[in-house]
Image (cartoon, rainbow, N blue to C red):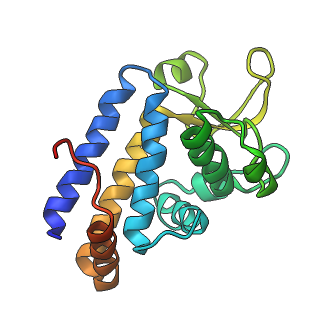
Amino acid sequence: MDLNTTESYFKKRVNELRRACKDTTPWVFLSAATFLEYLTKLVYGKDRKGKKYKRFIKDYLGKIQPLYKDFIYKDGNRDLPLQIYHVLRCGIVHSFSLIPDDRARTAGGRGRSIALCHKKEAKKKKLAHLGSYQSQKKTGVKDAALFVAEDFVDDLGKVTDLIFKRAKENKTLRNNMRRWINAHPPVTGGF
């Protein structure tokens, strides 16, 4: 694994996510959730069925934007990393829904604890990324963390930069990355 080539690969994927945001498509959230999962496995060099994903959100995304780990729902819950995993990642990847399945609900996932939009909608309604969101009119959302696609993708770009900066200084991280990439090479466009 060449670190510079690997870094370039992931930065290209972030740029693709940025381009996808322009279409105001929900697919960008699905792609971002799976990209985030790959970054998690890249950093830790293994898969721990969600445990590391939640830790990555706190330890890495939380460095980029503290609200990923410190967000407080109106009902007092401080569990956005858990909701990102069970509602955004599992919900959207497995069911294309923000309503968690029974297994995720048992583990603490709450339906509609995350709401999604793009910057155009957020500006129009004067909403902020990782702000508190409620809308009982259309969606029945009572208490959600709002994810604005463009801002979320920018944060993924920043966390990608952070990972590779740390990897240049940290042999354990480089070894984890090498182990994961060798066992599970990322998707490429060709055969």
Query: In this view, which residue lies farthest toward the bottom?
Result: 171
Image: 55 above or below 72: below
Residue nearer the viewer, 95 or 133: 95
Image quadrant holding the N terminus, namely bottom left
**Residue at horizontal 31 percent and vertical 69 percent from the top:** 183
Q: Position of residue 26 (x, y in %)?
A: 49, 27
Q: Position of residue 10 (x, y in %)?
A: 26, 52
- From the viewer's perspective, is 153 left or right of 73? left
Q: Quadrant of residue 143?
A: top right
Q: Is residue 188 left or right of residue 131?
A: left
Residue farthest toward the right in the current orientation of the protein: 75
**Callout count:** 0
In the picture, residue 142 is in which quadrant?
top right
Q: Is residue 47 above or below residue 101?
A: below
In this rendering, is residue 7 above or below 88?
A: below
What residue is shown at x 74% (from left), y 56% (from top)?
Answer: 78
State left or right for residue 19 relative to residue 3. right
Percent x, y of residue 32: 44, 43
Depicted 173 relative to depicted 96: above or below: below
Residue at the image position 33 percent from the left and 57 percent from the top: 160
> In the image, what residue occupies the spot 56% across and 57% down?
66
**Left or right: 64 with respect to 174?**
right
Residue 116: % across, % down: 58, 31
